[in-house]
Amino acid sequence: MESWQEPETSNEIIWLHWARRLQAIAQVGLTYTEGIYDIDRYQQIQQIASEMIAAHTNIEPTYVLDLFKNEQGYATPKMDVRGAVFQDGQILLVLEREDQKWTLPGGWIDVGEPPSQAVIREVFEESGYETQAVKLAALYDRNCHPHPPMAFHAYKLFFICELMGGEPKTSIETDAVEFFPVDALPELSLGRVVPSQIARLYEHWQHPEWATDFD
């Protein structure tokens, strides 16, 4: 996916929030309506939403509209999993080929895939390490954390994963695999993870008895 610009003001974030809500309304409407006039109205709403997002990012309206048209059915948040793998007090990060910044290995959950299996798969595909998901440390609403804006609403599931084997290996999505001290992180891919989340995951790793964070 093309990159998004950082929001410059809180007003821009509000506009993007409104645009996502309009897209959700249009998507649900197009799913359930049969009237040709209603279909036309919902398509117009979808067009307006894409233009609003384009006006506050560096993305072309046609690109955003194509993304929207690929979404069908009742609109719900997307689900992103991230695996926190610790070794000797350091955390595993991968260098994203897309933006050349570092992140926890992870990605979207596939349809029919349990979250714990998705995170194991993502960690292996992006880093080469075999792991076991041992704790769901946090289930966060992406909108409640300082991520750059994106077209869709998403929830982020952060798992503590135990290192079981394997060796560092890059993939079609990653250019490097390394462990870093939690207090000396490289530049992060903020659309995927922010420093406060890694700090919180480190605390969860130190306190496995803690309950799962949410929101």
Image (cartoon, helix red, strand yellow):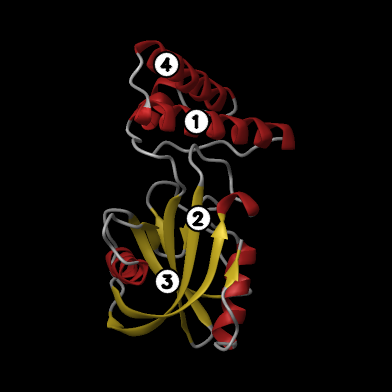
Marks 2 and 3 in Cβ contact (< 8 Å): no
Say the numbered circle drawn on residue 155. 2
Residue located 66% across and 37% down the image: 13
Give the x, y percent position of residue 181: 56, 77
* Quadrant of res 20: top right
Q: Earlier in the sequence, mark 3 or mark 4?
A: 4
- The quadrant of the rendering that contains the N terminus is top left
Label 1, label 4: how far apart the Cα atoms are:
12 Å
Q: Earlier in the sequence, mark 4 or mark 2?
A: 4
Residue located 36% across and 68% down the image: 119
Give the x, y percent position of residue 35: 36, 16
Say the numbered circle drawn on residue 178. 3
Up the image or down, 180 lies above or below 27; here it is: below
Which of 30/84 is in front? Answer: 30
Q: Earlier in the sequence, mark 2 or mark 3?
A: 2
Up the image or down, 102 lies above or below 161; here it is: above
In this rendering, which labeled residue sits more in front, label 1 or label 4?
4
Q: Is residue 30 left or right of residue 201?
A: left
In this rendering, which labeled residue sits more in front, label 3 or label 4?
4
In this rendering, which labeled residue sits more in front, label 4 or label 2?
4
